[in-house]
Amino acid sequence: MTMATDDAPPTTSKLNEERASAIAAVTLPKGDDLIGRAVTINRPRDELFAYWRDFSNLPSFMDNVERIDILSATTSHWVVKAPAGRTVEWDAKITEEKAGELIAWTSGEGSDVPNSGRIEFRDAGARGTIVTATIAYDPPAGMVGKVIAKLFQREPAMQARRDLRRFKQLMETGEVATAAWTQKQRDEEKA
Protein backbone atom coordinates (compact mmCIF):
# COMPACT_ATOMS: atom_id res chain seq x y z
CA MET A 1 0.00 0.00 0.00
CA THR A 2 1.30 3.45 -0.84
CA MET A 3 1.22 6.22 1.67
CA ALA A 4 -1.20 9.03 0.94
CA THR A 5 0.28 12.48 0.52
CA ASP A 6 -2.91 14.44 -0.02
CA ASP A 7 -5.86 14.75 2.38
CA ALA A 8 -8.27 15.77 -0.38
CA PRO A 9 -10.93 13.20 -1.27
CA PRO A 10 -10.26 11.56 -4.65
CA THR A 11 -13.56 13.02 -5.91
CA THR A 12 -11.91 16.46 -5.80
CA SER A 13 -8.62 15.32 -7.33
CA LYS A 14 -7.20 17.31 -10.21
CA LEU A 15 -5.91 14.06 -11.68
CA ASN A 16 -8.70 13.07 -14.03
CA GLU A 17 -8.18 9.30 -13.84
CA GLU A 18 -8.07 9.32 -10.01
CA ARG A 19 -11.25 11.40 -9.91
CA ALA A 20 -12.98 9.22 -12.49
CA SER A 21 -12.17 6.00 -10.62
CA ALA A 22 -13.40 7.48 -7.32
CA ILE A 23 -16.66 8.60 -8.88
CA ALA A 24 -17.16 5.26 -10.62
CA ALA A 25 -16.58 3.47 -7.32
CA VAL A 26 -19.58 5.09 -5.63
CA THR A 27 -21.98 5.96 -8.39
CA LEU A 28 -23.55 2.58 -8.50
CA PRO A 29 -27.23 2.70 -9.32
CA LYS A 30 -27.82 4.88 -6.24
CA GLY A 31 -27.29 8.60 -6.14
CA ASP A 32 -26.90 11.55 -8.43
CA ASP A 33 -25.44 14.00 -5.87
CA LEU A 34 -21.83 13.19 -4.99
CA ILE A 35 -19.95 14.40 -1.92
CA GLY A 36 -16.45 13.67 -0.70
CA ARG A 37 -14.96 14.58 2.67
CA ALA A 38 -11.66 13.65 4.28
CA VAL A 39 -10.00 14.06 7.66
CA THR A 40 -6.59 13.05 9.01
CA ILE A 41 -6.78 11.24 12.35
CA ASN A 42 -3.74 10.59 14.50
CA ARG A 43 -4.52 6.90 15.08
CA PRO A 44 -3.50 3.67 13.34
CA ARG A 45 -5.47 2.72 10.24
CA ASP A 46 -6.48 -0.74 11.51
CA GLU A 47 -7.83 0.71 14.77
CA LEU A 48 -9.99 3.25 12.93
CA PHE A 49 -11.24 0.64 10.47
CA ALA A 50 -12.19 -1.77 13.26
CA TYR A 51 -14.13 0.91 15.14
CA TRP A 52 -16.01 1.99 12.01
CA ARG A 53 -16.69 -1.58 10.84
CA ASP A 54 -18.64 -2.25 14.06
CA PHE A 55 -21.69 -0.32 12.82
CA SER A 56 -23.14 -0.21 16.35
CA ASN A 57 -20.38 2.35 17.11
CA LEU A 58 -21.44 4.81 14.40
CA PRO A 59 -24.28 6.55 16.31
CA SER A 60 -21.67 7.54 18.94
CA PHE A 61 -20.34 10.19 16.56
CA MET A 62 -22.89 10.40 13.73
CA ASP A 63 -25.22 13.02 15.15
CA ASN A 64 -28.17 12.38 12.85
CA VAL A 65 -28.11 8.59 13.06
CA GLU A 66 -30.76 7.45 15.52
CA ARG A 67 -29.88 3.79 15.27
CA ILE A 68 -28.36 1.09 13.11
CA ASP A 69 -29.76 -2.43 13.34
CA ILE A 70 -27.30 -5.14 12.28
CA LEU A 71 -29.24 -7.63 10.14
CA SER A 72 -26.31 -9.78 8.97
CA ALA A 73 -22.54 -9.56 8.44
CA THR A 74 -23.14 -7.49 5.29
CA THR A 75 -26.57 -5.88 5.80
CA SER A 76 -27.76 -3.21 8.23
CA HIS A 77 -30.90 -1.11 8.70
CA TRP A 78 -30.36 2.64 9.22
CA VAL A 79 -32.75 5.11 10.86
CA VAL A 80 -31.62 8.72 10.36
CA LYS A 81 -33.07 12.08 11.44
CA ALA A 82 -34.56 14.15 8.64
CA PRO A 83 -35.94 17.70 8.51
CA ALA A 84 -39.03 18.69 10.52
CA GLY A 85 -38.67 15.96 13.16
CA ARG A 86 -39.04 13.12 10.66
CA THR A 87 -36.81 10.13 10.08
CA VAL A 88 -35.72 8.31 6.94
CA GLU A 89 -34.79 4.63 6.76
CA TRP A 90 -32.98 2.24 4.48
CA ASP A 91 -31.21 -1.08 4.39
CA ALA A 92 -27.55 -0.90 3.42
CA LYS A 93 -25.58 -3.78 1.94
CA ILE A 94 -21.79 -3.93 1.92
CA THR A 95 -20.68 -4.30 -1.70
CA GLU A 96 -16.92 -4.32 -1.11
CA GLU A 97 -14.69 -4.64 1.92
CA LYS A 98 -10.92 -4.74 2.31
CA ALA A 99 -9.87 -5.20 5.92
CA GLY A 100 -8.15 -2.08 7.21
CA GLU A 101 -8.68 -0.20 3.93
CA LEU A 102 -12.26 0.31 2.79
CA ILE A 103 -15.95 -0.41 3.18
CA ALA A 104 -18.31 0.26 0.26
CA TRP A 105 -22.10 0.02 0.40
CA THR A 106 -25.32 0.60 -1.48
CA SER A 107 -28.84 1.05 -0.18
CA GLY A 108 -31.55 -1.48 -0.92
CA GLU A 109 -34.66 -1.08 -3.04
CA GLY A 110 -37.35 1.12 -1.55
CA SER A 111 -34.93 3.26 0.46
CA ASP A 112 -36.21 6.63 1.65
CA VAL A 113 -32.85 8.06 0.53
CA PRO A 114 -31.20 5.95 -2.19
CA ASN A 115 -27.46 6.10 -1.57
CA SER A 116 -24.13 4.40 -2.12
CA GLY A 117 -20.62 5.18 -1.08
CA ARG A 118 -17.38 4.14 0.51
CA ILE A 119 -15.23 4.95 3.49
CA GLU A 120 -11.49 4.60 2.92
CA PHE A 121 -8.59 4.46 5.37
CA ARG A 122 -5.12 5.40 4.00
CA ASP A 123 -1.84 5.59 5.89
CA ALA A 124 -0.50 9.10 6.38
CA GLY A 125 2.82 8.15 8.01
CA ALA A 126 3.55 9.87 11.30
CA ARG A 127 0.35 11.93 10.88
CA GLY A 128 -1.86 8.84 11.31
CA THR A 129 -4.60 7.92 8.86
CA ILE A 130 -6.55 9.77 6.21
CA VAL A 131 -10.22 8.79 6.42
CA THR A 132 -12.20 9.63 3.30
CA ALA A 133 -15.97 9.37 2.94
CA THR A 134 -17.42 9.47 -0.57
CA ILE A 135 -21.21 9.34 -0.82
CA ALA A 136 -23.66 9.46 -3.71
CA TYR A 137 -27.32 10.01 -2.85
CA ASP A 138 -30.69 11.04 -4.24
CA PRO A 139 -32.35 13.58 -1.94
CA PRO A 140 -36.04 12.97 -1.26
CA ALA A 141 -38.17 15.45 -3.26
CA GLY A 142 -35.18 16.28 -5.49
CA MET A 143 -33.76 19.81 -5.40
CA VAL A 144 -36.55 21.09 -3.12
CA GLY A 145 -35.76 18.34 -0.61
CA LYS A 146 -32.07 19.19 -0.77
CA VAL A 147 -32.75 22.87 -0.02
CA ILE A 148 -35.04 21.96 2.88
CA ALA A 149 -32.42 19.55 4.25
CA LYS A 150 -29.81 22.33 4.13
CA LEU A 151 -32.11 24.72 5.98
CA PHE A 152 -32.60 22.14 8.75
CA GLN A 153 -28.88 21.23 8.82
CA ARG A 154 -29.68 17.66 7.71
CA GLU A 155 -28.06 17.70 4.26
CA PRO A 156 -25.62 14.77 3.79
CA ALA A 157 -22.65 16.97 2.77
CA MET A 158 -22.97 18.92 6.05
CA GLN A 159 -23.49 15.74 8.03
CA ALA A 160 -20.45 14.01 6.51
CA ARG A 161 -18.13 16.92 7.36
CA ARG A 162 -19.40 17.13 10.94
CA ASP A 163 -19.46 13.36 11.45
CA LEU A 164 -15.84 13.00 10.30
CA ARG A 165 -14.81 15.84 12.63
CA ARG A 166 -16.59 14.11 15.55
CA PHE A 167 -14.99 10.77 14.59
CA LYS A 168 -11.58 12.46 14.73
CA GLN A 169 -12.34 13.93 18.17
CA LEU A 170 -13.58 10.60 19.51
CA MET A 171 -10.62 8.61 18.20
CA GLU A 172 -7.96 11.12 19.29
CA THR A 173 -9.37 12.21 22.66
CA GLY A 174 -11.89 9.55 23.65
CA GLU A 175 -14.84 11.95 23.57
CA VAL A 176 -16.78 14.21 21.24
CA ALA A 177 -16.52 17.85 22.22
CA THR A 178 -19.82 19.68 22.45
CA ALA A 179 -20.99 23.11 23.52
CA ALA A 180 -24.35 21.71 24.59
CA TRP A 181 -24.95 20.51 28.11
CA THR A 182 -25.89 16.90 28.61
CA GLN A 183 -28.92 15.98 30.71
CA LYS A 184 -26.51 14.83 33.44
CA GLN A 185 -24.81 18.26 33.48
CA ARG A 186 -28.17 20.04 33.70
CA ASP A 187 -29.24 17.82 36.61
CA GLU A 188 -25.95 18.47 38.44
CA GLU A 189 -26.33 22.23 37.96
CA LYS A 190 -29.87 22.16 39.38
CA ALA A 191 -28.77 20.15 42.47
Image (cartoon, rainbow, N blue to C red):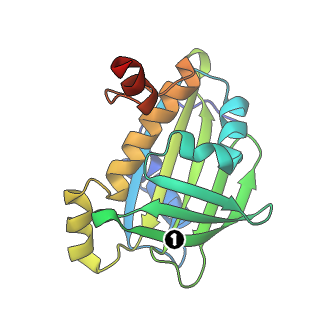
Query: Image check: 44 left or right of 67?
Result: right
Location of residue 6 in the rendering, given as x and y in whole percent from the top left corner: 46, 32
Instruction: Identify which residue is drawn at 38% across, 50% down.
Output: 159
Instruction: Identify which residue is drawn at 57% across, 49% down.
Output: 119
In the image, farthest residue toward the top: 126
Name the one closer to the observer, 9 or 113. Answer: 113
Name the one closer to the observer, 48 or 86. Answer: 86
Instruction: Identify which residue is drawn at 26% across, 68% down.
Output: 146
Looking at the figure, which quarter contains the N terminus?
A: top right
Q: How many numbered dots are placed on residues in this image?
A: 1
Q: Is mark 1 on a helix, strand or loop?
A: strand
Location of residue 35 in the rendering, given as x and y in whole percent from the top left corner: 38, 56
Name the one closer to the observer, 164 or 119. Answer: 164
Query: Image check: 52 left or right of 4?
Result: right
Location of residue 120 in the rendering, given as x and y in whole percent from the top left corner: 59, 45
Q: Which residue type does callout 1 highlight?
A: Glu
Q: Please, is residue 153 above or below residue 77 in the view?
A: above
Q: Can residue 28 be seen in this view?
A: yes
In the image, farthest residue toward the right: 73
Looking at the figure, which quarter contains the C terminus?
A: top left
In the image, farthest residue toward the bottom: 110
Q: Please, is residue 176 above or below residue 63 in the view?
A: above
Q: Please, is residue 30 above or below residue 65 in the view?
A: below
Which residue is denoted by mark 1 in the rendering?
Answer: 89
Query: Image check: 61 left or right of 190?
Result: right
Q: Quadrant of residue 123?
A: top right
Mark 1 crowdedness (10 Å alpha carbons): few <14, some 14-19, many ≥20: many
Location of residue 73 in the rendering, given as x and y in whole percent from the top left corner: 80, 60
Name the one closer to the observer, 15 or 24. Answer: 24
Q: Please, is residue 30 above or below residue 9 in the view?
A: below
Q: Is residue 7 visible?
A: no
Instruction: Identify which residue is drawn at 33% across, 63% down.
Output: 85
